Image: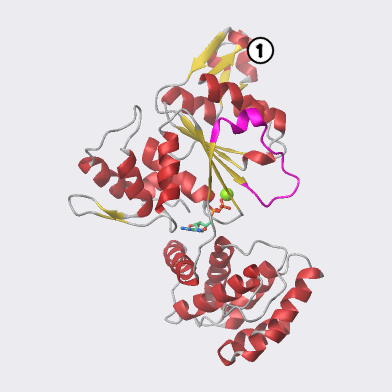
Amino acid sequence: MTDALRLPAEQTHRSELDALKRTDDGPKPAGWALSPKAVLTYVMGGETPDGTEISVKYFGPTRFIETAIATLATDRALLLLGVPGTAKSWVSEHLAAAIAGDSTLVIQGTSGTDEAQIRYGWNYAQLLAHGPSKDALVPSPLFRAMETGKICRIEELTRMGSDVQDALITVLSEKMLPIPEIDGSLYASKGFNLIATANDRDKGVNDLSAALKRRFNVVALPLPETADQEVAIVAKRVAEMAVSLDLPSPKNIKTEIERVVRIFRELRNGETDDGKLALKTPSGALSTAEAIGVVIGGLSHAAYFSDGAFSAEAVSADLLGTIVKDPVRDKAVLEEYLELVLRTRPNDAPYYRALSDLV
Ligand SMILES: Nc1ncnc2c1ncn2[C@@H]1O[C@H](COP(=O)(O)OP(=O)(O)O)[C@@H](O)[C@H]1O
Ligand SMILES: [Mg+2]
């Protein structure tokens, strides 16, 4: 056992990956740990030929994941696009774990990311003592992925400055990283590829240049289509996270998840679920990931402050914080929703009361 709060996917799901590897007789692209079909089973869930059950990682259309896997077997890189909380990072981690057996080569894109974080840096003590050499070079995750034929993950690609993004063009088109300081170059080993994620809702992002865009195949991950699907995703992730956080799951959790998800969906879609009433929408994305966060917050509150009873009171503070991002505009949106919708539903009376007390 380990004390780590969270382990990478390839460790959490090692027995599943081992079972898939044991029974995998499909053709494998060079450098891959599993065949594309086995990678698909790992992500979408199923069963191996010898009867080992593989849990579902991603709930959503299979064809998106098929396209993503097929892309990674070509010379184009993969860009997962979508609003926040649509499991882009999650899918990227699981794909890297299944394809390369390593999901930890990650670069987080921010406005402060510089070229050295993409390419390589220097150990200055070594550099001063011995001059530029391979030993003085500090490889980036991308460098190591190229060297070892693995998948490099770049999170939030469009938050990095355009000049920094463009450092990727040579890597993706030539599969090579020049190292002029030592008059050398690094040629990517077979199996190397790149999965980037980007948000299509952020303001102030740096759009990809046409030259870079051409090197990516874009797969847009959707929000869950139906309420049932969304409830299933939230229930599964909450159950998994509750175990790892040692939080008890109360009996009524499913019903409360249904209520929270309905509130999220109605506000996000701008209409009640029967389609009869148009509503204003708040500024936040109200994603599935946020619904998971609200329910986990409620579970923690219930466990430590309300004797384990999961109630509207336990989730309402988190719910409010998630819905009201802009204190003026979103507050008006929530007030309208409370009066026009929740107030009229007897089953939602506890939510109406708890939220009305807070806004
Ligand atoms: N369709 C889905 N299938 C499985 N998990 C999902 C889905 N949508 C959201 N999640 C969950 O939401 C959480 C956050 O997703 P994340 O990958 O961080 O979102 P993003 O990177 O798109 O902002 C993850 O724990 C993930 O399990
Ligand atoms: Mg992400």
- Using the image, determine if residue 149 lies above or below residue 270: above
On the image, the x and y values in percent for residue 114 come to 69, 30
Using residue 155 as the reference point, say whether residue 101 is left or right of it: left
Q: Amino acid at mark 1?
A: Leu
Residue at the right extreme of this rendering: 328
Residue 208 included in the magenta stretch of the image? yes
Mark 1 lies on a secondary structure that is: helix
Q: Residue at x 61, y 33 (%)?
A: 213
**329 vs 321, nearest the viewer:** 329
Q: Residue at x 21, y 41 (%)?
A: 22
On the image, the x and y values in percent for residue 181 come to 62, 10
How packed mark 1 is, by other alpha carbons closer than 10 Å (few <14, some 14-19, many 20 or more), is few
On the image, the x and y values in percent for residue 95 come to 42, 43
**199 vs 291, nearest the viewer:** 199
Residue 166, located in which quarter of the rendered image? Answer: top right
Judged by its main secondary structure, the magenta piece is loop
Residue 65 included in the magenta stretch of the image? no
On the image, the x and y values in percent for residue 136 come to 57, 16
Query: Where is mark 1, residue-wise?
Result: 128
- Using the image, determine if residue 213 lies above or below residue 289: above
- Using the image, determine if residue 285 lies above or below residue 1: below
Q: Residue at x 45, y 49 (%)?
A: 64
| The C terminus, quarter of image | bottom right
Using residue 1 as the reference point, say whether residue 84 is left or right of it: right
**35 vs 241, nearest the viewer:** 35
Residue 319, located in which quarter of the rendered image? Answer: bottom right
Tell me which segment is drawn in magenta. 199-216
Residue 355, located in which quarter of the rendered image? Answer: bottom right
Residue at the left extreme of this rendering: 50
